[in-house]
Amino acid sequence: MESSLMTQVVLPAALFTIMLGVGLSLSISDFRQVFKRPGITCLGITMQLLLLPVLGFTVVSVLELPPALAVGLMILTFAPGGATSNMITYLARGDTALSVSMTAIVSMIAPFTLPFLTLLSLQYWMGEVEFSGFPVLTTMIKLVVMTIIPVVIGVFLHHRFPAFCLRLQTGVKTLSMVFLLMVVVGIVKANWNQLPDLIGVLGPAVFLLISLAFGLGYGIAKQLGVQSQQALTLGIEVGVQNAGTALLVTGAVLQNAEMSASALTYGVLMNVPAFILIFYRNLRARIVTA
């Protein structure tokens, strides 16, 4: 399969399907949860949209990542949340309702903030002349079509046909995983010769970013009096990013394999601390109840 077909067709289809799955799991009451706990939700969203990019900038600057890899990692910080954070929150015994409600809101905001922040990153690291023509409006429209619209469709279907959506979720998740696997294989193939070096460079940056994001997300919430379960959830929401959205921007819009490698490497390595957290939380729960 040609690279253009992979990035222009398969990748958007994968993200659309993933976000449709997110919408099918959401209900109107999930959005109402925001108004029941506005303080915690606003704190979490603020850290996702503001703190996370600052942490990303700090990490790529201190570690002096090559420009393309730096931009790729920054784009990842502009795409917080997603279905993965909901799953990790659930498995780690966090506040799943809070996680889902934050995903619902951020999914509606990120398509409008991400293109502008991406343009600033391109100008800062890659040079204003080369990327001065970055299509902000076109990218925004693509993100709305690929993320907001499928979520809205999913929420509508969930509201009208809840039993049908419950049966449909498994198939949608399977299809999205197939699409995403095809994209991953394509990116790995495009970077096969450079992959060992890329992982060597990106690995420390990815682990440092995840550690700082989770640690500060959890720590700030605790310092502000948020209860442990909700603070854990905010830590996960700040620490886990939407690699699918980042791949869409780096692969389908920018068509830059190195930038996509940043998102791909994150998507793989992120599972390590996530697994450790899930294992620790469940082991601790068993010890407490024993």
Image (cartoon, rainbow, N blue to C red):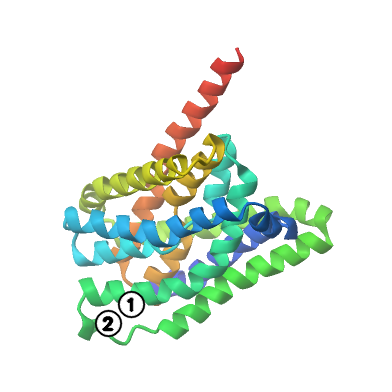
Which residue occupies 68% across, 69% down?
A: 152
Q: Which residue is mark 1?
A: 119
Which residue occupies 20% across, 66% down?
A: 67
Q: Secondary structure beneath disc 2? A: helix
Q: Is residue 132 above or below residue 62?
A: below
Closest to the observer, 99 or 22: 99
Task: Using residue 180 as the reference point, say whether residue 203 is left or right of it.
Answer: left
Q: Which residue is mark 2?
A: 131
Closest to the observer, 233 or 226: 226
Q: Is residue 90 above or below residue 58?
A: above
Image x and y of residue 119, in percent: 33, 77
Q: Quadrant of residue 168?
A: bottom right
Give the alpha-carbon distance from disc 2 to disc 1, as whole Å.
8 Å
Task: Using residue 11 as the reference point, say whether residue 270 is left or right of it.
Answer: left
Q: Where's the N terminus, which quadrant?
A: bottom left
Q: Quadrant of residue 94?
A: top right
Which residue occupies 52% across, 48% down?
A: 85
Q: Quadrant of residue 76?
A: bottom left
Q: Secondary structure beneath disc 1? A: helix
Residue that sits furthest to the top in the current view: 290
Q: Amino acid at mark 2?
A: Phe
In primary-sequence order, the first of circles 2 and 1 is 1
